[in-house]
Every structure is written in structure tokens, then in C-alpha cells.
Image (tube, helix red, strand yellow):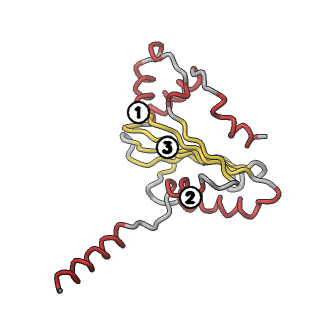
Amino acid sequence: MKTSVFTTALFVLLTLVSCNSEPSLQKYFVENTENKDFIALDISPNILNLEKTKLSAAQTEALNSFEKMNILAFKATDKNKVEFEAERTKINAILKDPKYQQLMKVGSGKDGASISYVGTDDNIEEFVVFANRKENGFAVVRVLGEDMNPNNIIALMSVLKESKIDMKQLEPLQQLMK
């Protein structure tokens, strides 16, 4: 009897400890993917339509470190201004967590963008770009990868310039900008 009570108590304790109720960007994405005010896209490296033989060694390394990109965008309208402010506040609160190290911030609090990352300088797991504009809405972009570093991101930007991106996959984002 004592063993079963002890085992049950231990199981409940472990369950409670393992449930992390802290907000995270990943949880935020999952919670809002089906929300009608949001546009969600998952983009793999295949969207780039690249001729890999023409890439430099640095570009190839950058592309190999890139796993996927998650985009979550909120389109602001006259009818959802309160929701827009509430959602933007949630994102800002999540990005204030010390695990998100801010690299750069431009603009003011109402309109602007920030770039943050998770990981160490030599092993970045995730880059986060948060851009918002009161008139249009906001977008959060998570660039996920393995062993990424700032040089990889710069090289990835050069790869993006050379790519032949399949714009059909990005149509939902184009609707946001209208």
C-alpha cells in the first residue's frame, strides 16, 4: 500500500515538473496556427529552387545548417486592433525571455523589427525575426537549423538572392501586405 501511494505521488510530481507552462515561441505558433487572424507557413529549403552545384562552400554550409522556416503573421484590420495589440504584447513578452538574445532592433515600439537568436554564438539553434507595423500587422519568422552561426545567416541571405523561390507557396503572405 505504501509503495503504491509513494509511486503515485512520485508520478504526479514528475508530471507536474515536466509540464513547462512558461510561454514559448513554439507554443505560441502551435496555439495560433488555426486562428483566423493569423497566416501560418512552414517553409523548407526546397522552396529555394537552387542549383546546388553553383553554390560556394560557405553557401552550401549555410544551406545545410538551415532546416526550416516557420512564419506566423497577423493581419491588422480596423476590426481587430485590440487583438493586434494583445498578440503583439504576447510576442514581446516571449522575446524578453533571456534565452532569446537580441542581435538588433530597428524602429520604435509601435513600428519596427528585431532579430534575436537562441543558442550560442557558434551554435545557433534558432533565429527569430519579429517585424510589426500598426497599419499592416506583424510577422514572426523562426529560422530553425543546426550549428548555424552569424556567417551562415549572411551566406543564407546571399543564397536567397540567387534562388528562384516558388512564389505560389508565399501567396498567403502576399495577401497580408495588401
Q: Amino acid at mark 1?
A: Ser
Q: Nearer the viewer, residue 56 or 28?
A: 28
Residue 105 appears in the figure: no
Under tag 1, what secondary structure? helix
Crowding at label 1, few (<14), some or many (≥20) Cα neighbours within 10 Å? many
The image shows residue 136 at horizontal and vertical percentages of 75, 48
Q: CA distance from mark 1 to mark 2?
A: 27 Å
| Tags 3 and 1 touching, CB below 8 Å | no
Pointers 1 and 2 in contact (CB under 8 A)?
A: no
Amino acid marked by disc 3: Phe
Mark 1 or mark 2: whose residue is earlier in sequence? 2
Q: Where is 50 relative to 121, above or below?
A: above
Q: In percent of the image, x 54 and y 36: which residue is there?
A: 43
Question: Is 173 above or below relative to 47?
Answer: below
Looking at the image, residue 10 sits to the left or right of residue 32; the answer is: left
- 65 vs 83, left or right, is left
Residue 78 location, quadrant: bottom right
Residue that mark 3 sits on: 127
Q: Which residue is mark 2?
A: 31
- The percent coordinates of residue 45 (x first, y second) are 50, 30
Amino acid at the residue labelled 2: Glu
- Residue depicted at x 41% and y 33%: 65
Report x, y in % for residue 117: 47, 47
The crowding category of the residue bearing disc 2, from other C-alpha atoms within 10 Å (few below 14, some 14 to 19, many at least 20), is few
Residue at point 44%, 49% (across, down): 118
Residue position for label 1: 65
